[in-house]
Amino acid sequence: MKFSWTSLQISIAGARLSHLVQKDKIWDHGSMIENSRILFYLVQKAMNTGKIESLKKHVTLSCYQELEKEMDSIKKKGLLNSNENPVITELAVISVCERKNNKPDMFKASIKGYLRKEGSTVLDNNQHRFSFNCSFVRQGDWWLLHEMKH
């Protein structure tokens, strides 16, 4: 049996989630995974089109400011309107933290996949792979993207 740090993180997060969901339905694992997937694709689409204003209601202020900086960098490099689309192959909740003191409810998700060229249906070794760790914070009955790291 091979030891995997990510598998251990997923197991611990799952155990905590089963306890938290009994208190509050926002901790539903399926909803958290779906929210992570949707927000990831929204960010990728916004970054490809250069229209990040649409993300304001889905991300925290600090995340939006980071995305603006990254967008400026992308524009300077001339990488807008990429013909590559992200395909998620793995998405897992790797940690959960219930609100304590001044820290809000939060969870982290690991998102892995590859970029597929438009029109391509086959995964080949020339396609770019990606791996992100994203953190989400609770605002009312919603999860907002707080941070996205490579």
Image (cartoon, rainbow, N blue to C red):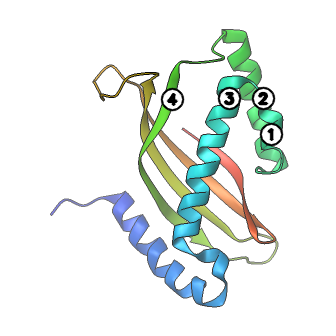
Q: Is residue 130 left or right of residue 66?
A: left
Q: Tell me the number on the disc at residue 54.
A: 1
Q: Image quadrant of residue 105? A: bottom right
Q: Residues within 10 Å of mark 4 (few under 14, many from 20)?
A: some
Structural distance between the alpha carbons of marks 3 and 2: 7 Å
- Give the secondary structure at mark 2: loop
Structural distance between the alpha carbons of marks 4 and 2: 16 Å
**Amino acid found under the numbered disc labelled 3:** Met
- Give the secondary structure at mark 1: helix
Q: Tell me the number on the disc at residue 47.
A: 3
Structural distance between the alpha carbons of marks 1 and 4: 19 Å
> Residue most toward the left?
1
The residue at the point 67 percent across, 84 percent down is 24
Decide which of tag 1 and tag 4 comes sooner along the chain.
1
**Amino acid found under the numbered disc labelled 2:** Lys
Structural distance between the alpha carbons of marks 3 and 4: 11 Å
Q: Are marks 1 and 3 in contact (CB under 8 Å)?
A: no
Q: Are marks 2 and 1 in contact (CB under 8 Å)?
A: yes
Structural distance between the alpha carbons of marks 2 and 1: 7 Å
